[in-house]
Image (cartoon, rainbow, N blue to C red):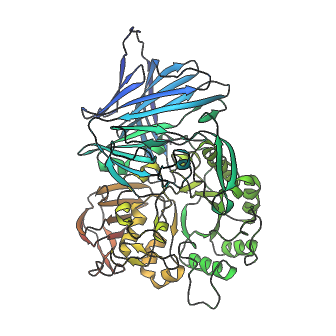
Amino acid sequence: MTLKHIISLTILTVALPCAARDYTLASPDGAIRAAIGDNLHYAVSYKGAPLFTGEAALTPVGSKTLAGVKSPRAAKVDETIASPFYRNDSIRDHYNALTFRAAKDWRVEFRAYNDGVAYRWVYTGRKPVKVASEKVEYSFSGDPGAIVSYVRNDGSQGLEPQFFGSFENEYTESTIAQLDSARLSFLPVVAKPAEDVRVLLTESDLAGYPGMYLRGGNGPVLRGVQARVPKKWHVGGYIDIQYVVDEREDYIASLDGARGLPWRIAVIGPDATLAQSQLTYQLASPSQIEDTSWIKPGKVAWDWWNNWNITGVDFVAGVNRQTYEYYIDFASKNGIEYVILDDGWSVPGCGNLFDVVPEIDMPALVKYAADRNVGIILWAGYVPFEKDLEEVCRHYAEMGVKGFKVDFMDSNDQMETGFLDRAARTAAKYHLVLDFHGSHIPAGINRKWPNVLNTEGVNGLERLKGYDIRLNQVKYDCQIPFIRQAGGPMDYTQGAMLNGTRDTYRACNERPMSQGTRCHQMGLYVVLDSPLNMLCDSPTNYIREQECTDYIAGIPTVWDETRFLSGKIGEYVVMARRKGNDWYIGGITDWTPRDITVDMSFLPDGEYDAQWYVDGVNAHRHAQDYKLECEQAGRSKTIHLAPGGGFAAKLTAR
């Protein structure tokens, strides 16, 4: 049942000539305050200390810039919203709001939560309108630190090439003023205006509006940048499955009628606040799917990362019937819900998804899986999936396929975000789940379309197959729970059974390994949000490591409750999650070994049987070394984490 309490009132104002008036908006607990000027300049403070100032403006085509507001209307909201495929089964949505009139058909809404502030433009008109530009600007005093992911393009050819990329990169730590002014950073971005205060900047509810990048390097200011609407494009890119833009319009978006524009979000607080914030979900549009009973999250036996490398069989492994039957048998035996057929099942270069390679009888394979309670998910390139969207979804849904992993969108302009919304709607019509790989952060689409179970936009484990050995993945792993994860669930694809220390890790496409220990990989299944969660390694390796496989295969992927226990951005993190009466606890560290005491005072009264997978005594030299400890859980436990280490636990109520 939804609990809702809303109070609204109108604030009457008196126009003051030649002077801007401020309206104060405070979070429910009073810690965050925004002073909003009628010129749409605003100042945000936290616990009495100023944090940043912001500027907002919007320019419709054929109209003057909207940069002033009046007649605010206030509201207080305290409700509970359902979040059935996320880190908690419900979320308290508690905020204060001011909504201003900016022009005849335009409003600006500000909200203050206990963990941040957000605003958006709302178009209330009925006629179509084009948006020439939107101004988003955050200004800090001094020169605070920043943690950003640049687009991979180096910026030497200007902005346009930077709008075509995979939203995957390491984090760069700098000050805002020292950021590379030629390069765009994709969201989320973190600013560090004080020792114990972080400001995470992100967005939510795109739905056919361009996503935003941030650009720094000219003083302590971050400015929003958006791609304009594509005017001309051609099919190209990776194996001709991408749209490559040749020319753009002179506006960033075209609106068909009344709608809200994306929320500009600032999550505010210490590291723990960033790790716990769910504002991108709270600010997204409500679910458009009335009956979600058919949506099944779960784990996926995945082929691509392990390069179809299975051994001990009497057939040649690869994209063929025997190999996928092996994957299906493995999934069925271990209670794994899905098997994915990644790139290679459809005839390459044919430009459509109806021609299956002769080595696979797709209807027979789907039936083979269904008879063993395993669902099939198919990989699909952007262009072939988009051009035959309705027919592809209908055809494969009727065959019994359960969903698609759609890949290589590599953009966030209006054409691409409109496609994501349309694809989710069409897939839902045919009861298909989606994983948007090769895409930006979900930005709330997982609430509007809960059949979108996962999204990439993360420098995940696939980068270790052939990337520069200098990549510090274990540090990145300790950053994303505080940064990328604030943008929503991620298709990180953990689960490597071959593991390397800092000295022994090697990039290898044929037999890939992870950086860090075995227990680091296992801990990621608790630390990361991932409702559709890959088992990246070969079934052969999992069969040889059944003790670890039992934990990975049995862990839930959506949760009734999630708790951040401890951590620091880029150093370590410990999370606890509950499903029913069982608790799972996981933790990871960077290359620094450390002893962590896990406080379990949050556990309800009662006794728990605990299984702890911890780094072995020699994990510092052989990263696959681990130990399974079975005991009755106490109220705390001290664990030693090796360099790049981790731990994972299951606590079962007696």
Q: How many marks?
A: 0
Q: Position of residue 61 (x, y in %)?
A: 61, 26
Q: Who is closer to the viewer here, 461 or 396?
A: 461
Instruction: Examine the rendering and report whether any part of residue 289 can be seen.
Output: no
Q: Quadrant of residue 507?
A: bottom left
Q: Position of residue 431 (x, y in %)?
A: 67, 56
Is residue 626 shown above or below 247? below
Is residue 583 shown above or below 19? below
Instruction: Examine the rendering and report whether any part of residue 464 can be seen.
Output: yes
The C terminus lies in quadrant = bottom left
Q: Who is closer to the viewer here, 646 or 253?
A: 253
Using residue 239 as the reference point, say whether residue 183 is left or right of it: left
Q: Position of residue 29 (x, y in %)?
A: 30, 34
The residue at 33%/77% (across/down) is 503
Using residue 241 as the reference point, say whether residue 203 is left or right of it: left
Task: Return the residue found at the far front.
Answer: 156
The residue at 72%/60% (across/down) is 397
Q: Who is closer to the viewer here, 485 or 600?
A: 485
Q: Position of residue 99 (x, y in %)?
A: 47, 24
